[in-house]
């Protein structure tokens, strides 16, 4: 039983984390709130801990430490050290609650990796996992496309989602009736375009999960069903209109091509660049549209007047979304450069926002780590990624290229905060390292 439970737990996490946000918002709407909902939301942490304990009991011993393991432990030690250090020593302002949020946030990928390193997955289990990942990708894309075309946007305004974000998570969104502003591409005031958000309730999180699934489908032997699945998943990715993912996917495909010594992923990368350029240009005219309410328009106009005019060209660095991301990255880099020893956990990103602080850095994984755990924590995390990539480049080109995609996405986004990526990618990466060097890559089992 202890040997089977961790494997089943990974399957449950792959599916459950994809449904988590929508389920929590619906529970809020049904009246499960505050501490009760926090307890329910901790299912993933409890399951991860239980699975790791069961995997350790089944393994009977700890695997031989690799360089990736040592750097993972160094990263965890740096995070715990910065949690223990008094905020006053580091000029930090985080609350105890914010520190705990940040501790869980930063250690989640490490916990998933530890679970993976304790797992022994045979070909049959890798096949189950691969098929589950494809099913999740197809489901995310299919539901997302149905949503943006058939579910009225007003339904989301009237749902429990806005209050779940603001009252449960402490994330206040102003200009879209409490919904995240990135649900809409502000093409014009009369008929703005909707972006696919799927069950993640986020175009970014959905796009990044779909990138991992597309890399898997590019790595497996092509068959009729894999090509059909890839077409639907890729359509879902396009409709998220997430330009960071449009960049990360071809970059990771080129990595896959180099690792596999195959021209096919390189051709797919070139084709993806051409398609996404055309799609970004056409999306304002072909995408699903909605309308703003009077109060939403007033808020957006006030914001535009305060921030100044931005370019409408989606390929310009002056475009509002692009310039915002670049500004956040630049400001975060400057903050880390001026304060390289860090401010302590809870001073960056969502952990700071949820506790009423102005984040000292946001969006980028690297600048958030630099603020929370200093250059020490940032260097350990970056070294862990590099060591993992090197260790996986022959064992699993798909997972190595997925890590490359995560590393690229981390420049713009807090990828650790997307729990599906933190758990699935790092757990499977750890599990792939348990395979003997001569074994076939896990993707060959699909």
Image (tube, rainbow, N blue to C red):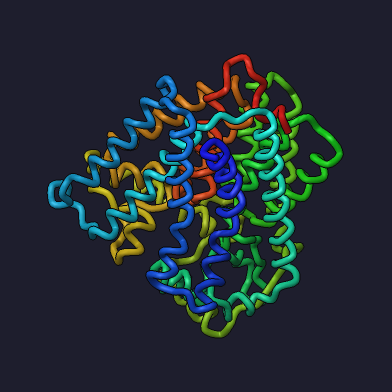
Looking at the figure, which quarter contains the N terminus?
top right
Looking at the figure, which quarter contains the C terminus?
top right
Count numbered badges in the picture: 0
- Determine if residue 356 is in view: yes
Is 137 placed left or right of 161 in the picture?
A: right
Residue at image point 61% right, 45% down: 11
Residue at the far left: name it. Answer: 89
Residue at image point 56% right, 49% down: 13
Residue at the far front: name it. Answer: 1
Q: Position of residue 183 (x, y in %)?
A: 58, 65
Of residues 279 and 361, the one drawn nearer to the viewer in this rendering: 361
Residue at the far right: name it. Answer: 224
Residue at the far bottom: name it. Answer: 294
Q: Position of residue 265 (x, y in %)?
A: 72, 30
Residue at image point 24% right, 46% down: 83
Does residue 129 lie above or below 144 as drawn? Answer: above
Residue at image point 69% right, 41% down: 214
Is 129 placed left or right of 326 in the picture?
A: right
Is 416 placed left or right of 319 in the picture?
A: left
């Amino acid at each position: 039983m202890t040997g089977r439970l961790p494997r089943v737990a990974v399957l449950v996490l792959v599916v459950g984390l994809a449904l988590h946000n929508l389920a929590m918002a619906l529970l809020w709407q049904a009246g499960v709130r505050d501490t009760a909902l926090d307890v329910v939301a901790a299912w993933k942490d409890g399951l991860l801990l239980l699975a790791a304990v069961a995997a350790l009991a089944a393994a009977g011993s700890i695997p031989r430490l690799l360089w990736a393991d040592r750097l993972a432990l160094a990263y965890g030690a740096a995070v715990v050290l910065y949690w223990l250090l008094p905020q006053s020593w580091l000029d930090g302002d985080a609350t105890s609650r914010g520190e705990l949020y940040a501790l869980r946030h930063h250690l989640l990928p490490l916990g998933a990796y530890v679970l993976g390193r304790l797992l022994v997955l045979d070909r049959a289990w890798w096949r189950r996992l691969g098929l589950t990942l494809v099913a999740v990708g197809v489901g995310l894309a299919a539901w997302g496309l149905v949503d943006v075309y058939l579910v009225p946007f007003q339904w989301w305004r009237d749902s429990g989602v806005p209050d779940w974000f603001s009252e449960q998570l402490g994330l206040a969104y102003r200009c879209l009736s409490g919904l995240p502003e990135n649900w809409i591409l502000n093409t014009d005031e009369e008929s703005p375009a909707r972006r696919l958000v799927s069950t993640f309730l986020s175009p970014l999180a959905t796009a990044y999960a779909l990138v991992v699934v597309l890399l898997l489908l590019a790595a497996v032997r092509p068959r009729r069903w894999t090509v059909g699945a890839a077409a639907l998943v890729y359509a879902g990715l396009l409709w998220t209109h997430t330009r960071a993912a449009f960049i990360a996917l071809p970059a990771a495909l080129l990595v896959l091509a180099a690792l596999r010594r195959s021209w096919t992923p390189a051709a797919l990368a070139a084709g993806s660049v051409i398609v996404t350029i055309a799609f970004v240009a056409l999306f304002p005219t072909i995408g699903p549209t909605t309308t703003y309410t009077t109060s939403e328009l007033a808020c957006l106009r006030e914001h535009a007047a305060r921030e100044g005019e931005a370019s409408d060209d989606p390929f310009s660095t002056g475009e509002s979304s692009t310039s915002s991301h670049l500004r956040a990255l630049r400001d975060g880099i400057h903050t880390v450069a001026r304060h390289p020893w860090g401010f302590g956990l809870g001073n960056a990103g969502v952990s700071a926002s949820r506790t009423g602080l102005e984040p000292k850095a946001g969006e980028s994984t690297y600048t958030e780590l630099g603020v929370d755990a200093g250059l020490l924590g940032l260097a350990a995390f970056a070294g862990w990624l590099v060591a993992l990539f090197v260790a996986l480049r022959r064992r699993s080109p798909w997972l190595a290229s997925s890590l490359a995609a995560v590393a690229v996405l981390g420049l713009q986004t807090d990828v650790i905060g997307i729990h599906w990526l933190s758990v699935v990618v790092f757990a499977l990466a750890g599990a792939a390292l348990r395979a003997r060097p001569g074994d076939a890559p896990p993707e060959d089992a699909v």
